[in-house]
Amino acid sequence: MKLAKTYAFLKKDLSVIEDALEETVYANQPVLHEASVQLLKAGGKRLRPIFVLLASKFGEYNLSYIKNVASSLELIHMASLVHDDVIDNSNMRRGKPTVKAKWDNQVAMLTGDYIFAKALQQFTEIQQPRAHQILSDTMIELTMGEIEQIKDKFNIEQNFRTYLRRIKRKTALLISSSCQLGAIVANTDKKTETALYRYGYYMGMSYQIIDDILDFTASEKELGKPAGSDLLQGNITLPVLFAIEDPALHKELSTLFRNPAHIKGETLLPIIAKISSSDAIKRARKVSDMYLQKAYDSLQVLPNNQAKEALENIANYIGNRQI
């Protein structure tokens, strides 16, 4: 099943959110406006707004109110991607030039800041203080995750706990917050809110691990960027951590990482090939599957409805995706 089919009943509501996003990123300054629109039109699954809407289906569903949360969370995600591209010096995302590639680092950083600010402005429509506290905490953790990733670049001595904490902050918490905030603005009961938060957290962990696997197993055309980009940028992901348990590969990668400035894509090709063909991929997928099962389990306390079925189908799609 294609991902879009799992939430086809939300098509009209997602169209409303897409319109809200376009309206929100409008800027009077031409360069800022063009950069923001380019980012918006670059594509993306819009998973965070989808999770907000699905979570809200378990309570009082008021789209005119809920859309402010959904669009705000997507804007925060978009802004973090712009900043990521500057940090990682990435010129391509989803097969298209990044903002920093089309303009420069300064424009990219200011575009990210602008979109963050617009997200917060949009969120002021929400009159529930706890929702604001959760969003603030999430943004703090997101920033901490970015700092940790910079700190740990080219450090192959990091452990599994460090990696899991980093992807929790960089990816999982924004997804879990999407589910939780959707529940809060729909005034669901605490049991439902907690179940949806847990589902989002476990889904986010699985999603990022699959992303890290695909960086080695998918093609450049499928990824929209060179395969092995994470490793080229010095980001040590779960497949790498498993693979370098082999002393020979650990030594080989350690030697290369002593001079990061001299590392080129072709230099890493043999290592990327070794990781891709090793049991590290299978082991990483098992960890992803473990989180995925926890996501399924979290849904069991929820009533059976169209939204629950969609959440289960999204989990199934993400766990088996190839791109």
Image: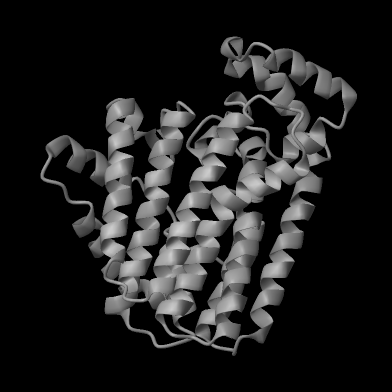
Is residue 246 placed above or below 304 in the rendered structure?
Answer: above
Q: Nearer the viewer, residue 44 or 303?
A: 303
Q: Residue at x 76, y 32 (%)?
A: 275
Is residue 158 placed above or below 203 in the rendered structure?
Answer: above
User: Does the rendering let one see residue 228?
Assistant: no
Is residue 308 placed above or below 254 in the rendered structure?
Answer: below
Q: Position of residue 202 (x, y in %)?
A: 65, 63
User: Does the rendering let one see residue 244?
Assistant: yes
In the displayed orientation, state which residue is furthest to the left.
28
In which quadrant will I find the N terminus?
bottom right
Q: Position of residue 51 (x, y in %)?
A: 48, 69
Q: Is residue 119 left or right of residue 138?
A: left
Q: Residue at x 62, y 52 (%)?
A: 168
Q: Is residue 289 left or right of residue 20?
A: right
Q: Is residue 26 left or right of residue 261?
A: left
Q: Residue at x 77, y 53 (%)?
A: 287
Q: Position of residue 284 (x, y in %)?
A: 76, 47
Question: Residue 261 appears in which quarter of the rendering?
Answer: top right
Protein image colouring: one colour
Q: Residue at x 63, y 70 (%)?
A: 198
Q: Position of residue 106 (x, y in %)?
A: 30, 28
Q: Nearer the viewer, residue 23 or 142?
A: 142
Q: How many marks?
A: 0
In the displayed orientation, state which residue is furthest to the right.
247
